[in-house]
Amino acid sequence: MTLSIRDARPDERAAVNELTLRAYAEYATIMSPAAWAGLEAAMRSALASDERAERIVALRDETLLGSVMLYPASADAYSGAVRRAGSPEVRLLAVAPEARGLGVGRALMAECVRRARNAGAIELGVHTSRSMQIAMRMYARMGFVRVADSDFQPPGAELVQAYRLPLTEHSTDR
């Protein structure tokens, strides 16, 4: 499958928001109601925010299959919930349910790695929770490592676990 990875256009913002909410909807049945409510509110807030972030999309034949937000090191990606790590941060990696298993998430993450390296970053961060096992396995295969001192836990929600990828030459070759 040939994917096109590019910045989202302003006129695609509603479609990206819809895809993200649809991609994460499965967690409503996995997480506790309080944890899901917190995640959904945080997603809606991030999607509506004008905080500086690159909104990146993956398409096949102009069909939107995935999206991700890449925050620069200077941005407050989690609205004060966690101390700033001084590195770019990936947020809201989303793959349309019908496109899962096709490498869309991996391609979007590889693009984030490429952009972070091009910006001169020495590491790339991402946060996730125990309900997101597939994402956690992908991050581990890519070389992300746990950084527990950057975890945070919103009231009633799951522990949001921090991971960092050292941006060495071979860090995503796994």
Image: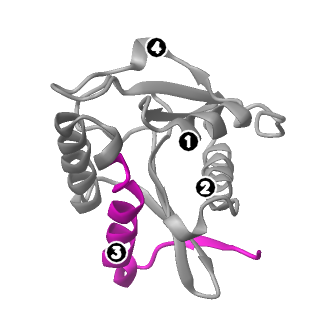
- Residue farthest to the bottom? 61
Instruction: Identify the mark nearer the N-term, 4 or 2.
Output: 2
**Residue identified by numbered label 3:** 13
**Residue identified by numbered label 4:** 148
Q: Position of residue 29 (x, y in %)?
A: 31, 46
Marking on residue 17: none
Q: What is the C-alpha distance between the residues marked 3 and 2?
A: 19 Å
Q: Are marks 1 and 2 in contact (CB under 8 Å)?
A: yes
Amino acid type assigned to the residue bearing label 1 in the image: Ala
Q: What is the C-alpha distance between the residues marked 3 and 4?
A: 33 Å
Which quarter of the figure is the N terminus placed in? bottom right
Q: Is residue 172 at all visible to an observer of this figure?
A: yes
Marking on residue 135: 1
**Residue identified by numbered label 2:** 105
Secondary structure of the residue carrying tag 1 is helix
Instruction: Identify the mark nearer the N-term, 3 or 1.
Output: 3
Q: Magenta stretch: residue 11 in it? A: yes
In the visual, does 99 lie left or right of 14?
right
Q: Position of residue 120 (x, y in %)?
A: 64, 40
Secondary structure of the residue carrying tag 4 is helix
Q: Which residues are magenta?
A: 1-27
Which quarter of the figure is the C terminus placed in? top right
Q: What is the C-alpha distance between the residues marked 1 and 4?
A: 17 Å
Q: What is the C-alpha distance between the residues marked 1 and 2?
A: 8 Å
